[in-house]
Image (cartoon, rainbow, N blue to C red):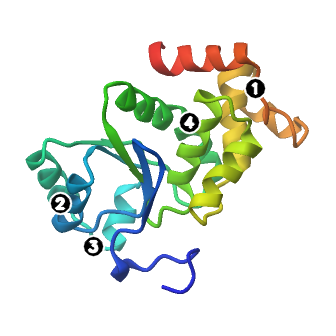
Amino acid sequence: MDNPFEYDFNRGLYYHYVAPDVIVGSQPRNALDVDALAAEGVGVILNLQQDKDMAYWKVSLKEISERAAHHGMRLVRTPAVDFSPHSLRDTLPTAVSALERSRAAGDKVYVHCTAGLGRSPAVAIAALYWFTDMQLDEAYAYLTGIRPCGPSKDAIRGATYDLLSGRPHEHFQHEPSHAFATLSSWDRDAIRAKLLHG
């Protein structure tokens, strides 16, 4: 695979550690890929794919689920439409909540979509933004410096707006391009409370 921005199904798992307990990568294609994740110590597979994504690549969710269960791994699904910033925006809070709850329980989490270039890295960036001291640009640069990818920064800003503003979803389009790209400690506390205890 010469271009890291293109998905090559035949390459197999293509992933990067973005934290000691968080891995972002491409879809597990079969039971052998799940075995490889188990060998890495993964306890939770967080899947952002829709059923049609797996069907297109002829990946059996049943096979993945059964092999994950065999290893004592949990499979968590928070589907988002591929290449849709609006769908990703809506999915991010649920996906980040699942990620952070799993980490808090002591699990290593493998976060994936199909190629691991859009949806899954966006989840990891949002988690860094909401759960560490990094601002959005820092979190984005940190992750894309580890894993070549191009997730939607606006989807993350939009999800941040949704969690904090209390205003209608569609009003976000009138916000300036830098709005909700930085958080105060109070903002982070509010987001964490919603995602972990809400």
Residue situated furthest bottom in the rendering: 2
First reached walking from the N terminus: tag 1 or tag 4: 4
- Residue 127: which disc? 4
- Gap between marks 3 and 2 measured at Cα: 19 Å
When asked about the image quadrant of residue 170, the answer is top right
* Rendered residue at 46%/19% (across/down): 196
Label 2 CA crowd tier, 10 Å (few <14, some 14–19, many 20+): some
- Gap between marks 3 and 4 measured at Cα: 30 Å
SS assignment at label 3:
loop
When asked about the image quadrant of residue 14, the answer is bottom left
Give x and y (percent) for residue 134.
69, 35
Label 1 CA crowd tier, 10 Å (few <14, some 14–19, many 20+): some
Residue 166 seen from this side? no
Of circles 3 and 2, the one toward us is 2
Give x and y (percent) for residue 61.
23, 57
* Circles 2 and 4 in contact, beta carbons < 8 Å: no
**Mark 2, residue position:** 35
**Mark 1, residue position:** 183
Label 4 CA crowd tier, 10 Å (few <14, some 14–19, many 20+): many
The disc labelled 1 sits on which kind of residue?
Leu
- Gap between marks 2 and 4 measured at Cα: 26 Å
- Gap between marks 3 and 1 measured at Cα: 41 Å
- Gap between marks 1 and 2 measured at Cα: 39 Å
- Residue 58: which disc? 3
Label 3 CA crowd tier, 10 Å (few <14, some 14–19, many 20+): few
The disc labelled 2 sits on which kind of residue?
Asp
When asked about the image quadrant of residue 59, the answer is bottom left
SS assignment at label 4:
helix
